[in-house]
Image (cartoon, grey):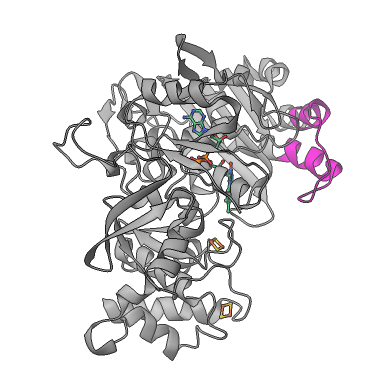
């Protein structure tokens, strides 16, 4: 059985001091969408997890002479940031196709980079944006260009106690165009190949070119040789063909469960050509907002970093009790009621809900963040409870499927619509499906079919074929409006 202590430091120094104390048997945990999956799969067996969620220094997005992203910036917050979407679309595009809503609601930029998968979707955008990573540990802070950060599959140059504190992206030049593209088995799956391009144009001539591909070598690649070929040139069809061939020769992909080596090689050339074309389109004059400086600070809507602290509360005085690392009384709001429960550190929210509160509507399918059967709402956002540590529930508002039912057992309009439109067959996926629908409709009351499909992309159903489910959500949206 999995067992670990769980620490919730409030400051960077406290976190790396804990890491120094525990050494190799400990792990940092950010959103946990990789760490908890590996723990649940018994791939790693840490005896201590050190949560970075309560550390304010790792929080926030700011845009002053470029972009600063705290290591704990949630993908959800990047996706919804209007300035990043218009000014740095390469990053927003990558994040919008990364995993599914449940993962994006808790996963972080720092986790994606430190995970260091060759397919990490944030890597190519940050490479072409020439980002620097700031790493802090007992020896102080140092900065590393993102292209030097990755050293092998799942490996990077972080020291054993260092924390990725922030990512800095320099201000972009006028007439910069950028684009990210990804090929996966499903639209939001781990990449078979991903690619990013950034071009600075002076009329028809490309004066600066940055290109990167992922999932085709042991580390995400910057294509410096190809960049040189493009700079100073007008981008013609002939040039694009040459670029495609060169990229295919540059990469060293492998065959794995997702794809063959040959397919990856061909697709990397094709994707780079398409990314260049897409970047060219948005490099048009006017795409850049001169002097456009804005500040957009995340509020950690899922209860991420700031969620542990309420506005105006001091770091020392408030937040989770960091005293006991193995067993703790957790206080949170559950389906509208204030509750407290004593839980051991290794329990996930799913286990607490099902075992301690007997709320068995929330199901366990895969236990690995893949199927969405365990979806609940935490502070209004849909989250996979099977990989959400129970200690992190402190101070949160949790809604389960039972919480949707009104007085006198009146079903929620979403539940009614699922019944009426045949969105339920065996019913195992239904609670999770309904909770994701609820999160979607609360934020987007009149979704398009495409938005509905994206909204439930983290929920798998083996029975219905999804047509009736999409019909049900469309009907619920109509009924609610
Ligand atoms: C269903 C599913 C789909 C996924 N799809 C994608 C996808 O399409 N694309 C993709 O790129 N990834 C995908 N992932 C992988 C994973 O979700 C992402 O890499 C995610 O960004 C990890 O972030 P996290 O905050 O959850 O990291 P965690 O799991 O908390 O941590 C990951 C690693 O980074 C370390 N770490 C975290 N933050 C820091 C920090 N600030 N400083 C030092 N070390 C740190 C941890 O110790 C751990 O080793 C998917 C995962 C799941 C479960
Ligand atoms: S995602 Fe949690 S049980 Fe499958
Ligand atoms: S209704 Fe059976 S898994 Fe969806």
- Farthest left residue? 312
* Residue 299 in view (yes/no): no
Is 81 placed left or right of 159 in the picture? Answer: left
Is 207 placed left or right of 227 in the picture? Answer: left
* Residue 106 in view (yes/no): yes
- Residue 85 pos. (x, y %): 40, 40
- Residue 390 pos. (x, y %): 41, 53
Tell me the residue at 47%/71% (across/down).
Answer: 433
**Magenta stretch holds residue 252:** yes
**Magenta stretch holds residue 135:** no
- Residues drawn in magenta: 242-270
Is 353 placed left or right of 149 in the picture? Answer: left
* Rendering quarter of residue 214: top right
Tell me the residue at 17%/39% (across/down).
Answer: 311
297 to 170, vertically: above or below? below
- Counting labels gives 0
309 to 238, vertically: above or below? below
63 to 331, vertically: above or below? above
């Amino acid at each position: 059985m999995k067992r670990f202590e769980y620490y919730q430091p409030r400051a960077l120094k406290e976190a790396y001091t804990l890491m120094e104390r525990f050494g190799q048997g400990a792990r940092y945990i950010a959103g946990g969408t990789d760490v908890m999956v590996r723990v649940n799969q018994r791939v790693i067996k840490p005896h201590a997890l050190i949560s970075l969620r309560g550390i304010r220094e790792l929080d926030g997005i700011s845009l002053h002479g470029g972009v600063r992203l705290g290591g704990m910036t949630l993908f959800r917050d990047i996706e919804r940031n209007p300035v990043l979407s218009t000014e740095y679309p390469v990053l927003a595009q990558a994040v919008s196709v990364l995993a599914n809503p449940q993962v994006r609601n808790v996963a972080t930029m720092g986790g994606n980079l430190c995970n260091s998968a060759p397919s990490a979707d944030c890597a190519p955008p940050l490479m072409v944006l020439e980002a620097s990573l700031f790493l802090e540990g007992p020896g102080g802070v140092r900065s590393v260009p993102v292209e030097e950060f990755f050293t092998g599959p799942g490996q990077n140059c972080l020291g054993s106690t260092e924390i990725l504190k922030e990512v800095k992206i320099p201000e972009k030049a006028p007439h910069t165009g950028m684009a990210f593209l990804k090929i996966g088995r499903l639209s939001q799956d781990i990449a078979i190949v991903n690619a990013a391009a950034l071009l600075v144009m002076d009329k028809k001539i490309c004066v600066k070119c940055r290109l990167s591909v992922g999932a085709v070598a042991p580390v995400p690649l910057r294509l410096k040789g190809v960049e040189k070929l493009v700079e100073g040139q007008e981008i013609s069809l002939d040039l694009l063909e040459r670029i495609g061939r060169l990229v295919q020769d540059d990469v060293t992909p492998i065959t794995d469960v997702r794809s063959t080596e040959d397919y990856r090689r061909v697709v990397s050339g094709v994707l780079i050509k398409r990314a260049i074309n897409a970047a060219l389109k948005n490099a048009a004059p006017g795409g850049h907002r001169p002097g456009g400086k804005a500040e957009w600070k995340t509020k950690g809507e899922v209860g991420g970093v700031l969620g542990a602290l309420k506005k105006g509360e001091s770091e020392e005085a408030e937040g989770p009790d960091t005293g006991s690392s193995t067993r703790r009384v957790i206080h949170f709001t559950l389906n509208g009621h204030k509750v407290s429960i004593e839980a051991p550190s290794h329990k996930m929210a799913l286990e607490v809900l099902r075992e301690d509160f007997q709320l068995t509507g929330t199901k366990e399918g895969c236990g690995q963040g893949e199927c969405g059967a365990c979806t609940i709402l935490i502070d209004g956002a849909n989250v996979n409870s099977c990989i959400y540590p129970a200690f992190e529930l402190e101070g949160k508002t949790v809604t389960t499927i039972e919480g949707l039912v009104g007085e006198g057992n009146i079903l929620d309009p979403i539940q009614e619509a699922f019944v009426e439109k045949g969105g339920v067959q065996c019913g195992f996926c239904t609670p999770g499906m309904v909770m994701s629908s609820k999160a979607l409709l609360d934020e987007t009351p009149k979704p398009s079919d495409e938005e509905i499909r994206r909204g439930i992309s983290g929920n798998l159903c083996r029975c219905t074929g999804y047509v009736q489910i999409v019909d049900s959500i469309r009907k619920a949206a109509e009924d609610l409006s």
